[in-house]
Each structure stands twice: as structure tokens, then as C-alpha cells.
Image: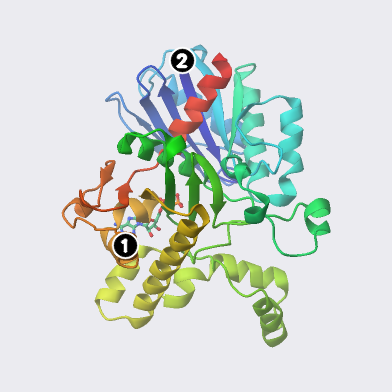
Amino acid sequence: MKILVINCGSSSLKYQLLDMEGEKLLAKGLCERIGIDGHLTHKPQNGRPLFNEDVPMPTHTEAIAAVLDKLTSPEYGVVESMREIGAVGHRVVHGGEKFAASVRINDDVMAAIAECIPLAPLHNPANITGIEACKAVMGDVPQVAVFDTAFHQTMPGKAFMYPIPYAYYTDLKVRRYGFHGTSHRYVSGRAAEMLGKPIEELKLISCHMGNGSSICAIDGGRSVDTSMGFTPIAGLPMGTRCGDIDVSILEYLSANTGKDIKELTNILNKMSGVLGVSGVSSDFRDLDTAAAQGNDRARLALDMFHYAVAKTVGGYVAAMNGVDGIIFTAGIGENSAATRAEICKYLTYLGIEICPECNKKRGEDTFISTEGSRVKVMVIPTNEELVIARDTRDIVAG
Ligand code: ADP
């Protein structure tokens, strides 16, 4: 079966077409500036040329139509007709407490995704738009929703509750949800394969470190705690998000700057994290360069990030009363040997030993700990699209 995977943002749409026989990528691409003017980058994987041009996209419906046009075109295509696409899998950010697993989309599911809009006001409306656009262009082709939050629905109350009046949970659904669930699920499954043990017998800690970063404690294949919370601002300091801070800072800043909560929350989301501390950049490559040139604030921002990751990992070792493997993934986790080495310096008490040569490898699943290391450390490039495609295939076939 061939499956189209869609990750829809408010003005963008990323896609991949996979042939599930052999889990082969056939094409991938990106629509940008939807609703503004429109640009399509389409990369067939069969040797046909790259398409990289402006295409009018007043709405997501024209974007999906343009994608299907390229996927089936004689010049850039990878399939002969749209009928070859057996199903569509959508990344949906927030499933609230309703969805602990992926699900075939019908009217009830659409209503439930819409109910979660207050919890993810930027993301869920875009995801709904993408689903509706596919329906408009592709008709009755089965569609499946795969939620970022679903994997974390196994967290126990002691991990997902906030110590605030209980009615805020029951009436307003304020609790830890966690994000990046599809990535944490994928890399923990791969880690179990690499370790050669059933995931049910393993305690794993997955560190997804990209523009947004989160850590997840996975006990026996189930998420038992994670660092993002009610929203993705929580936990670690990130590129531009502050991570965990004392909530009283908001009132104090409001009183002293005249900015309201909305403005300040925007600053905490978009101008904080390593960008806010360093004043240099949200990109860790720029911070590495600046720190190497003697920029103290870039160095401080990096140190704060490593320290926060190490403290969270330590907390999750306690939460699970042990750990067998630690995984690094996403942009920083997959590419920055220096970041991994700095974090692991805090973890020698676990019997972790890093092999500097292995830590230099890139772009492949690899152990970066030594043979003798008591806890294994792995780099595993994440593949959320593959998880979405697999779930879609299983749900449509089953
Ligand atoms: P997203 O969270 O948007 O999916 P990614 O997982 O692709 O992001 O991560 C992007 C980030 O990865 C960049 O902002 C950059 O900070 C970081 N990154 C990528 N390559 C490197 C590298 N070689 N060294 C350090 N950081 C890197």
C-alpha cells in the first residue's frame, strides 16, 4: 500500500509518499506560503528532477491538489494515478485525553480534534484544514490521525497532574500532556531493537533535542513522564522557548514592563531560551561558533541547556528506579557530538562511558557508548513520518 503522510501547519504543508512494501520513500516535499502566494518544493526519489517553483495556493485545498498533481505528473511523478494512494496519515498535534492511539478519521473524530482547539490554538485548526483539504481533493480515501500527545497518555496521575486546585483539571483540562510522542515512540522502539531486548523489559530515556526539545521516560515501552507540559513551552530551555520558570515572573514582569500576559507569553515562547540568554541565535550551530570565539553568553546558554538536560535525565532515572539506555535524537541530538558529550559528562555516575570515535558518526542508528558502559547511549535519527505511515497502514488494513 502507498501512503501519503501529511504534516499541516497554518501556512505550510509537509508531505511524504511511502510505499509500505519495503517502507520505501517515493517522494517528499513542502508547500509554503499557503494563503499568501504559494511555493512548492517537490523531491521525487526515483531520479526524476526536483520541482521548486511558485504555485498559487490560496488555501490548503490548492496545496494538496498541487502535491497530487506533481506526485502523478509524467515529468516529476512517482505514481501513475491518485488511485494508487491507499490512505493518508495526518500528524495531529493535540488529542487531549480522548486519544491514546492513532485513529481512523470520521465525523466524530473531527469533532473531537476540534474540541481540542483551545488546548492547541495554533496547531489543531491547521491539522483540521489539512484533513478537510485531502477530503475535498481525494474523496473517500481513508484518512488516519496520529497525535503528538497520544504516546504520553500512559503517564500516571502523579506525573501528569499539576499541584493546583483539582477543579482546573476536571473543568478546564489543565494537566501535563507532553508532545513529540511520535518521535519518542519511534526511537524507543528502535533502541529496543538495537539493544536486542523486548521493549517491555527496558527502561529508556529519550532526548528529542531540536528547535523544540523534550525528554521522555519510557518504562516497558510506555511513557511514564515527559518534560513538556500543558503546552510545548515547558521543560528544557529551547531555541526560543523558556522552558520551566517560576510562574511569578509573569506578574513581576507585567508590573515592571507594562506588558500584558499575552505579550509576555509571546516573549517567553519566541524570544527566550538560548536565543534570549545568548542574544546571538536560536540555532545551536551559531551558538557553538560564537562560544568558540569567546562569546560568554553563548557559552552560558549552551551550559544551561546541557545542565537542564542532565538534570531531567537524572530525574527520570529516579522516576523509573534505573535506566538501560539513553537516546539522542532530532536536529541537535542527531548532529551535535559536542552537545551529546557535554550532557554525558554529567552522567558518569550512571557508569556511562562515551566512545569519542563513535560519537563522531552522523545520520545512522549508532551506539556512542563504549562496550563496557553500564548504561548504553544511542543516537537514533527520528522518523515520525514512518510511524504515521505504519499506523495508517495498520488501521486501514485492520
Ligand atoms: P524541529 O524541532 O523544527 O523539527 P529539528 O529537529 O530539525 O527542528 O532541529 C533543528 C535544530 O537542530 C536547529 O535549529 C539547530 O539548532 C540544530 N542543529 C542542526 N544541526 C546541528 C549541528 N550540526 N550542530 C548543532 N546543532 C544543530
**Residue 344, disc:** 1
Q: Tell me if mark 1 has few (under 14), some (14-19) or many (20+) residues whose alpha carbon lies within 10 angstroms of its own.
A: many
Marks 1 & 2, CB-CB < 8 Å contact: no
Name the N-terminal-most of marks 1 and 2. Answer: 2
**Residue 86, disc:** none
Type of amino acid at the residue the image marks with label 1: Cys
Type of amino acid at the residue the image marks with label 2: Met
Residue under pointer 2: 1
Residue 397 picture location, percent across and down: 55, 14
**Secondary structure type for disc 1:** helix
Against 250, is 342 above or below?
Answer: above
User: Which quadrant contains ligand 1?
Assistant: bottom left
- Depth order, front residue of 313/93: 313
**Secondary structure type for disc 2:** loop
Q: Residue 28, located in which quarter of the rendered image? A: top left
Asked whether mark 2 lies closer than 8 Å to ligand 1, one says no
- Would you say 159 lies left or right of 181 here? right
- Would you say 251 lies left or right of 391 here? right
